[in-house]
Image (cartoon, rainbow, N blue to C red):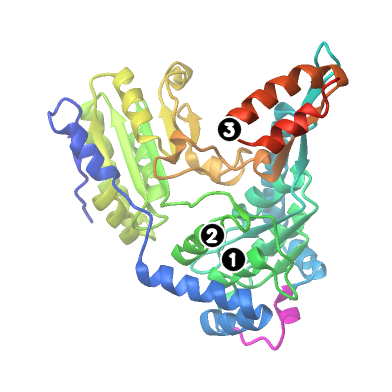
Amino acid sequence: MSIQIRKFDSRHPDFKAQLADVLAFEASEDEAIDRGVMLILDHVKREGDAAVLEYTKQFDHVDASNMAALEISQDELQAALNNLSPVRRAALQTAADRVRVYHERQKAEIGSAGFSYTEADGTILGQKVTPLDRVGIYVPGGKAAYPSSVLMNAIPAKVAGVQEVIMVVPTPKGVKNELVLAAAAMSGVDRVFTIGGAQAVGALAYGTATIPQVDKIVGPGNAYVAAAKRRVFGTVGIDMIAGPSEILVICDGSTDPDWIAMDLFSQAEHDELAQSILICPDAAYIDAVVESINRQLAEMPRKDVIATSLTNRGAMIKVRDMDEACEIANSIAAEHLEISTENPQQWADKIRHAGAMFLGRFSSESLGDYCAGPNHVLPTSRTARFSSPLGVYDFQKRSSMLQVSEGGAQTLGKVAAELAYGEGLQAHARSAEYRLKK
């Protein structure tokens, strides 16, 4: 099996246009999907549990008589954990422990208690940080199972101090994945419902007789889930609208080409729209990676998906030098950035935009997906220019705190009144002036 992957040279006069073309991706705005989601959300908002039961029967082929039949008990979650083989349980525990340690460190570094300071006149100003009360996490459950997504979404929420984490996961034809349930038990998820799709998002956003309304919904899903999250934003918070998975590898030509080829496969196998790009100043090395891709592709169980992804959205970019490679990487702002070089930190210092950076040839992106510790929920579609990985901070909110002293009111009151009169808001001005000494 052989495929053609596009090759670009940064010196070509049309390079910028070529790069823009390979990067082009618009989140699905399919009118039929959006219209269908709107109807589902409206139905769930009006009918609650009855609508959720109806759609679960229609889409997941699970005919439940009531919502209680769709909730998984803590006993069942714990049983799933106990039923894992010792090796698999140990692997899951190691991943959970590392994710927890990383996010506990993150919480400590960002200052979980907030701050305050006192001015000369006794006025106290500051900020209070508090966790969200209740969070909903969406875990995909259609074509594949994602226990790692349970860990990455639930653990930072619990570390942040969220009181109740409610998980929804579709179980088509009633088939439950034991590893997903075990991950929920290990992560401290409070309630689990076997529902999915836009109806699950609607239930979490609006609340039903059985499912309480949450404050924020996090976690990846299909086009219907993404469209539903977009529509309920404002009623609840959301983490992000995730696009196809991406990997960008900057390599100086010193890493085994087979390693790099497999790293590119690791994202291409997600789906046909995933993107895998290699940037390197060595043309001969690029050719060696392409040869490796075509040699190893036939061995991959998901070779058809990989081939489509690499053919349609993959690219090999020849650059002048490593400095230019970093410039292009900043323009791409990839979800995952591997810097597979000697002395990778010197190049990482030049990177401003990336969801997660993997430094050195032993830092494969797959380690970050499962067990390294940092969160694998990352900004895609160039949104790393202004977005961050999911973290403890996504499950906290901040309240400004003002305790104005009598002396402070004399100074600030005059300033506020003057500006309020300028805006034509007399009550604002008078409110401040009442505190002024006569």
Answer whether residue 259 is visible to the viewer in this image.
no
Residue type beneath disc 1: Val
Within 10 angstroms of label 2, few (less than 14), some, or many (20 or more) residues?
Answer: many
Residue type beneath disc 3: Glu
Q: Are marks 1 and 2 in contact (CB under 8 Å)?
A: yes
Q: Which residue is mark 1?
A: 201
- Residue 374 at x, y = what percent? 61, 38
Q: Which residue is mark 2?
A: 229
Mark 1 vs 3, N-terminal side: 1
Q: Residue furthest front?
A: 438
Q: Which residues are magenta?
A: 62-71
70 inside magenta stretch: yes
338 inside magenta stretch: no
Q: Is residue 385 left or right of residue 213?
A: left
Within 10 angstroms of label 1, few (less than 14), some, or many (20 or more) residues?
Answer: many
At x 70% / y 35%, what residue is drawn? 428
At x 78% / y 70%, what residue is drawn? 76
Front residue of this view, candidates 342 and 275: 275
